[in-house]
Amino acid sequence: MASVFAEEMLHLALAANLLNAVGGRPRLDTPRMLPPHPRRLPHGDPSLELPLLPFGAEAFELFLRIEQPAPPGAPAEGDSYETIGQFYDAIEQGLRHLCDRLGEREVFCGDPARQVNAGQFRHTAGRLIAFNDLASALAALEEIVEQGEGTARGEVWDGDHDVFHPERAEVAHFYRFQELRVGRRGAVALWDRKTR
């Protein structure tokens, strides 16, 4: 779980870098960002409520729902999205549209000094990068989705190697929660091999 937590902080930092890159300013301390629990994901599936839960089976079910991979061919959704991957696909479409319409230089107009670049992020194989163009922004979005849902939407692996066991491929968050739910590390890797 510690590696999932570290990767979620990486995702937050990458998202903040993206907002800074396009001239925005991340604000996490406004009252609108801190509504009481239970709460909903902003612009997400209105049926998904996020209560505060103790670590256990009910929390695993909530984590699995949040990290649920998008089905193959699922449409991008910027509002009332069913999966985080669909939300990030909508961001990708928006960035591509703006770059086509305005040009990358106009879209990525933020002050580069406002981005965090720490190289290797501690306790994860992910990398915290600064970016100033569409290619690097799309790579960051892909990193976020792959670590949460898996590579190529349907693969259990996130494309990285386990930071503590570099000889092993790392399992995406959704599948790590599956492993915790069944109480067996590697159970998902066995399942992946059987489904091929």
Image (cartoon, rainbow, N blue to C red):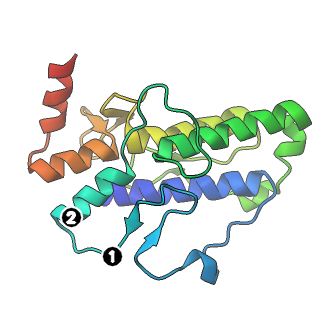
Query: What residue occupies the far front of the structure in this picture?
Result: 47
> Where's residue 18, x and y in %?
68, 51
Q: Residue at x 24, y 33 (%)?
A: 168
Please give left or right for residue 111 compared with residue 32 in the image.
Answer: right
Is 193 or 44 nearer to us in this picture? 44
> Where's residue 65, x and y in %?
33, 52
Q: Quadrant of residue 166?
A: top left
> Where's residue 57, x and y in %?
16, 62
The kind of residue tagged 2 is Glu
Q: Residue at x 52, y 56 (%)?
A: 44
The image shows residue 112, relative to residue 187, as above or below, that is below
Quick one: SS at disc 2?
Answer: helix
Q: Which residue is mark 1?
A: 52
Q: Residue at x 50, y 40 (%)?
A: 143
Is 141 or 94 nearer to us in this picture? 94
The kind of residue tagged 1 is Leu
Quadrant showing the N terminus: bottom left
Checking the image for residue 181, the label placed there is none
> Where's residue 111, x and y in %?
82, 57
For the question of whether residue 1 can be seen, the reply is: no
Marks 2 and 1, Cα distance to the nearest angstrom?
A: 10 Å
Checking the image for residue 58, the label placed there is 2
Is 177 or 186 nearer to us in this picture? 177
Please give left or right for residue 2 compared with residue 128 in the image.
Answer: left
Q: Residues within 10 Å of mark 1 (few under 14, many from 20)?
A: few
The image shows residue 13, relative to residue 83, as above or below, that is below
Quick one: SS at disc 1?
Answer: loop
